[in-house]
């Protein structure tokens, strides 16, 4: 059996090709689930929204406030949050940030 070639890249500044300056990049999509890489500039916001599945957000770089049901949580590089399915949430970027989202 022949498998597709290994895909690699750098989300921070590693030795592999950089993911680039795009705002959003779907790294993997399978069986309705996605791993998404997103970048935000300082001051950028993501308005209140909700997802139909639990969402894991891992912060790779920067500082953000993620608000769920009017309760803000500040997160920085190395932190993660899990947002329950259906919960209204928003994001406010305090300094340029890079995040991974699994949903």
Image (cartoon, grey):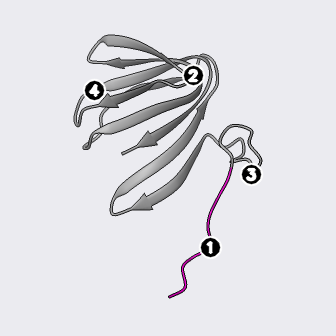
Q: Is residue 59 above or below residue 30?
A: above
Near mark 2 (Cα within 10 A), the count class, few <14, some 14-19 or many ≥20, is: some
Disc 3: CA contacts within 10 A as few (<14), some (14-19) or many (>=20): few
Which sits in the foreground, 90 or 13? Answer: 13
Mark-to-mark CA distance, 4 and 2: 18 Å
Q: Is residue 32 left or right of residue 43?
A: left
Q: Which residues are magenta?
A: 1-9
Q: Residue at x 30, y 30 (%)?
A: 83
How many numbered marks does the figure carry?
4
Can you give x and y, in whole percent of width and height, for residue 58 in the image? 47, 32
How far apart in space, not on screen, are marks 1 and 2 (Cα)? 36 Å
Q: Residue 87 — which label? A: none
Residue for point 39% across, 13% down: 73
Numbered label attached to residue 88: 4
Q: Is residue 85 left or right of residue 44?
A: left
Which of the two discs, 2 and 3, sits closer to the camera? 3
- Which label's residue is closer to the chain start, 1 or 4? 1
Residue 30: percent from left, percent from top: 39, 63
Residue named by callout 1: 5
Which label sits in the foreground, 4 or 3? 3
Which residue position holds label 2? 44
The reply, left or right, for residue 64 in relation to residue 69 is: right
Q: Is residue 25 above or below residue 13?
A: below
Q: What residue would you read off at disc 3? A: 16
Q: Residues within 10 Å of mark 1 (few under 14, many from 20)?
A: few
């Amino acid at each position: 059996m022949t498998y597709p070639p290994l895909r690699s890249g750098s989300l921070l500044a590693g030795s592999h090709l950089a993911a680039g300056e795009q705002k959003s990049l779907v790294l993997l999509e399978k069986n309705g689930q996605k791993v998404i890489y997103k970048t935000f500039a300082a001051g950028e916001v993501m308005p209140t929204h909700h997802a139909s599945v639990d969402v894991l957000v891992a912060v790779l770089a920067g500082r953000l406030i993620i608000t769920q049901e009017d309760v803000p949580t500040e997160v920085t590089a190395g932190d993660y949050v899990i947002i329950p399915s259906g919960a209204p949430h928003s994001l406010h970027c305090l300094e340029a940030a890079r995040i991974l989202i699994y949903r």
